Amino acid sequence: MAVKLACVVLMCMFAGALAQTISCGQVMANLLPCVSLVTGGAPTAACCRALNSTVAQASTTAGRQQLCSCLKAAFGGLNLNLADLKAKVAAPPCGVEIPFDLTTKTNCSLVQ
Ligand SMILES: *[C@@H]1O[C@H](CO)[C@@H](O)[C@H](O)[C@H]1NC(C)=O
Ligand SMILES: *[C@@H]1O[C@H](CO)[C@@H](O)[C@H](O)[C@H]1NC(C)=O
């Protein structure tokens, strides 16, 4: 299972290497410290740092749209409440602002 996941992530990274925006594979790899969020836990300091730098890399409209789709795919697929997740990481001590509205209904192609 872990091997399979690693393969998928690597394939994503390879496919994304040609794109200008951060690939979903990179986003997933970056956010591995955030696995506690998936089980409903609080974000760890490592997760907050990882998320902060991932958000910082999505500095263009295209980058934010891409990040939006990746987060929706990664966390939305797990039946997590995305708005909750966004609020959780925005709260202290994490304080990472995800720079767009994030719900399962968010249309990522409208993200600015
Ligand atoms: C996010 O990163 C920026 C730039 O490195 C830094 O100035 C800021 O304090 C960080 N914010 C959080 C919440 O870690
Ligand atoms: C998202 O917005 C784009 C641009 O307005 C539109 O073409 C597309 O149909 C919308 N997608 C959904 C799922 O609403």
Image (cartoon, rainbow, N blue to C red):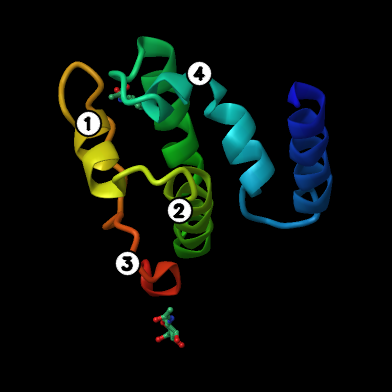
User: Can you say whether 94 is above or below 89 in the image?
Assistant: above
Amino acid beneath label 4: Pro
Amino acid beneath label 1: Lys
Q: Residues within 10 Å of mark 3 (few under 14, many from 20)?
A: few
Q: Earlier in the sequence, mark 4 or mark 2?
A: 4
Residue to which mark 3 is pinned: 105
For disc 2, does the CB lie below 8 Å from ligand 2? no
Q: Residues within 10 Å of mark 1 (few under 14, many from 20)?
A: some
User: Can you say whether 74 is above or below 112 in the image?
Assistant: above
Amino acid beneath label 2: Lys
Q: Position of residue 58 (x, y in %)?
A: 48, 48
Amino acid beneath label 3: Lys
- Structural distance between the alpha carbons of marks 2 and 3: 9 Å
Q: Secondary structure at mark 3?
A: loop
Mark 4 in CB contact with mark 2 (< 8 angstroms): no
Viewer-nearest residue: 2 or 14: 2
Mark 1 in CB contact with mark 4 (< 8 angstroms): no
- Structural distance between the alpha carbons of marks 3 and 1: 19 Å
Q: Nearer the viewer, mark 3 or mark 4?
A: 3
Residue at left offset 25%, top offset 21%? 94
Q: Earlier in the sequence, mark 1 or mark 4?
A: 4
- Structural distance between the alpha carbons of marks 3 and 4: 26 Å
Q: Earlier in the sequence, mark 3 or mark 4?
A: 4
The furthest residue to the left: 92
Residue 72 is marked as 2
Residue to which mark 4 is pinned: 33
